[in-house]
Amino acid sequence: MLLLALWRRLGRRSSAAGHVRCFSSAQALPSAEDFAARRREDALLGEIDARYPAFMVWGCNTDVGKTLVSTGMAAALLSSGKSQKSHVLYVKPVQTGFPDDSDARSVTQRIDSLVGRSESIFLSNRTMWLSDEASKKAALTKSSTDSSGSWKNSANSVKSSSSLTCETLWSWCAAVSPHLAAQQEGGGASDDELRKVLRRSLWEFGADASQTGRSWAFVETAGGVASPAPSGTLQCDLYRPLRLPGILVGDGRLGGISTTLAAYESLLLRGYETICIVIQDMGLGNNQHLSKQLHNRVPVFVIPAVPKNPGDDLAGWFHDTSSTFLQVVLLLEDAYHKRIQRLREMPKKASELFWWPFTQHRLVPEENVTVIDSRSGEFFSVYENKHGRFAQQFDACASWWTQGPDASLQHELAKQIAYAAGRYGHVMFPENVHEPGLRCAELLLQGVGRGWAHRVYISDNGSTATEIALKMALRKYAVDHGFLTNQGDKKPDFKVSFRCVYHFADCAAQVLALRGSYHGDTLGAMEAQAPSPYTGFSQQPWYSGRGVFLDPPTVCCQNRKWQLRVPERYGTIATEPAWDAREDVFALERDNTELAKIYSSAIEKEIMSSQGGLGGQTIAGLIIEPIIHAAGGMELVDPLFQRILTQQCKCHKIPVIFDEVFTGCWRLGAESAWELLGCNPDIACYAKLLTGGTVPLAATLATQDIFQAFEGASKLDALLHGHSYTAHPVGCSAAVTALEWFKDPSKNPNLLPGTSRLQEQWDPELVAEISSLSSVERVISLGTLMALELRSSSSSQKGYSSLLSSGVVKELRQVLGIYTRPLGNVVYFMCGPLTRPSVCSSLLRRMLKVLE
């Protein structure tokens, strides 16, 4: 409600300078109708106007002269008003010690004194919200108060070419840290509220001022880089979604080198650009040492020390520093233009230089290339040259299925990755141990591997993890079925070993897998999947498909019912089941149904017919994507079928691999998909969400029996597989951070109490409503995934090569702020384990708007 009040106030951009509105806790706030009337403005709240330069003014600590630096830069810009109109916006989002201390008022008065006498400049100072205590103290100053409760500061109201607009968004009376002031006086703004109001202020300033002359904005923080905001969030984290480039005001005093470098590195670690450092000359040469430590990458500007005489109006000081501040402004202007120019040319350069994966370049015109400037939590900041803005887009691809962090976890991952890089760099892994790798293995065995796994093989990507799993399964089958003999401590007979391997290969060892599954892009992994667009001759000429591939029954939501689709090969089902609730699909009671017997009989027949012994086929392993076939079109495979398939293979001593590269680590609402299936694998693969999506890492977990199949007296009996970056400490540290965060109830609000499950993130009613649309063939939703298949009128509009969804995707990206990438005529939304259900509901409502 406080935000609505601020929006209403911001909408009244009156020409009366110094108009200030105070909302007390007892005052009636604007109604929902006022909010609805601002729908257009609401659409802009996630955007930053890129048509003019806007900079943060950071301080390495309090009392280092941020406001004086802001004033000096504003004066440098406004002093050239005769030759060029200039409009400067100064925003102080958070002010304490008000009204005795008002940085916005100080900037206004000093500019009036420094520039106003020689230039025709319109000055305006506004305070948007005051606490009750600040309002009462302001009244005691006997400043004029009108009947509506407005308080007016003095200002130069001369209409002129150039202008300075100063705004304070939130003010408290106590001269303490903002989080303490908010606790003592109330009215603390949430992080979202503060950012939204700041974005709106920047946007409206650009809309008002950009038509005439040049426009600049400075946003001055309170205290130091890591000082708390009203909510308690560190300011460097609070403003990160905006990611404005900044000026850091350093400390020239004793100890200032340390505080300045610490502040700089805090900003760097969070992905900010620091254009320059400005520091007072206290006679200690801090600037020289800073330049040396920064390797001259960041210019350091020196200004004279500020006179301590309280009666000094600093006119002389500003005169002495004017040339330096002009140099600062010129540097900032150059940095702004270089940044925008680089962003503008990126689509063309990308089209000329990149070879994008899974992309037909002829179908991607230059204007369709998305320029991603940064990411904060679940949102991209996308530069849109056509509109001259940075727009927020929700990453509904979870950056191709890897992402899980919100903004808080992103910051923590960045810190832990930096720590690991600083501590270890990279170290080789065979016969060695390091803390990140060991802790990662412990967490995996306690989590996704609990109750069944005993060993962890850490590699670097999902496809590699499945290749390793296949090697494990084939060796285990060979040992169990007499093709290889465990030699124990005896010296192996290489002739016998060779002969055994030869006969095993002669048996045409194959895997049992499901059509529509996908296990990676490397050659071995592709052999373990059925023919598909990814394995065709033009893609993989060596492909032979070393497997027996079954058609899986699938489940989807159609017309508000969860329907089962059973392929004809399993016979005619008298009445195919349908359920009102998705949970019924996973019920273990289904094991006792007639359908379970049908599945069991068909699977047993397939296994027996494929076990031909020497000279024939041999199924030496089962590999499945549990529950969801992702790249195969986001199909939900009947969990009953996969459960029976797993059980039947175990009965025949066929090792079972669960490829959970996509489905594991909370992607489907459980820590591991085997929890949903109700049965365990012998081997399982994890990647993608394993590190929170920050750096590549994968893990293949196995039982002790699998591990023992590689034990022997010779190194040649070991698993001879590895990569230079196996178990790299940076990736392991990221995995430890993500795994601990996702399962911590204090950090993951979606965890159901006392369980390892997430609450429902996709509103079942909205999912059902989408499933009833005439344009939709089917819908699935599970955990962090929601997908729909658009209804097609011909076979050419179906499948991976279909362009049927292009119109939907375009509107989602360009109009509704959702970045998604389809799988042919399948459009999906993917969030993270930390995403609030309200956010998911918002995405579904936008999808409904497009489809309707």
Image: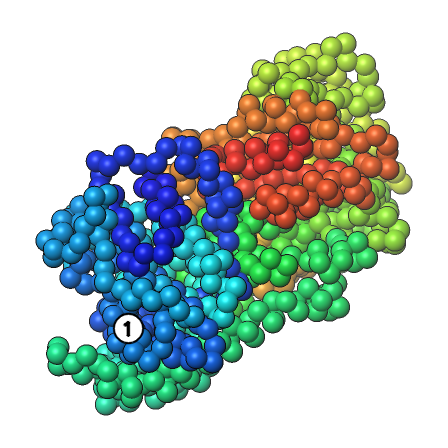
Residue 787 at x, y percent in the picture: 65, 35
Residue 127 at x, y percent in the picture: 28, 55
Residue in front for this viewpoint, 489 or 329: 329
- For the C terminus, the image quarter is top right
The image quadrant of residue 548 is top right
- What residue sits 21% from the left and 48% below the top? 146
Residue lying at the far left of the rendered structure: 140
- Left or right: residue 155 versus residue 714 is left
Looking at the rendered structure, the secondary structure element under dot 1 is helix
Residue 579 at x, y percent in the picture: 62, 16
- Left or right: residue 279 versus residue 342 is left
- Left or right: residue 497 versus residue 157 is right
Residue wearing tag 1 = 112
Residue in front for this viewpoint, 169 or 764: 169
Residue 496 shows in the view: no
- For the N terminus, the image quarter is top left
- What residue sits 57% from the left and 57% below the top? 382
The image quadrant of residue 387 is bottom right
Q: Is residue 628 above or below residue 506?
A: above
Residue 594 at x, y percent in the picture: 70, 12
Amino acid on which the number 1 mark rests in the picture? Asp
Residue 330 shows in the view: yes
- What residue sits 36% from the left and 71% below the top? 121
- Left or right: residue 658 versus residue 320 is right
- What residue sits 57% from the left and 33% below the top? 844
The image quadrant of residue 300 is bottom left
Q: Is residue 732 above or below residue 77?
A: above
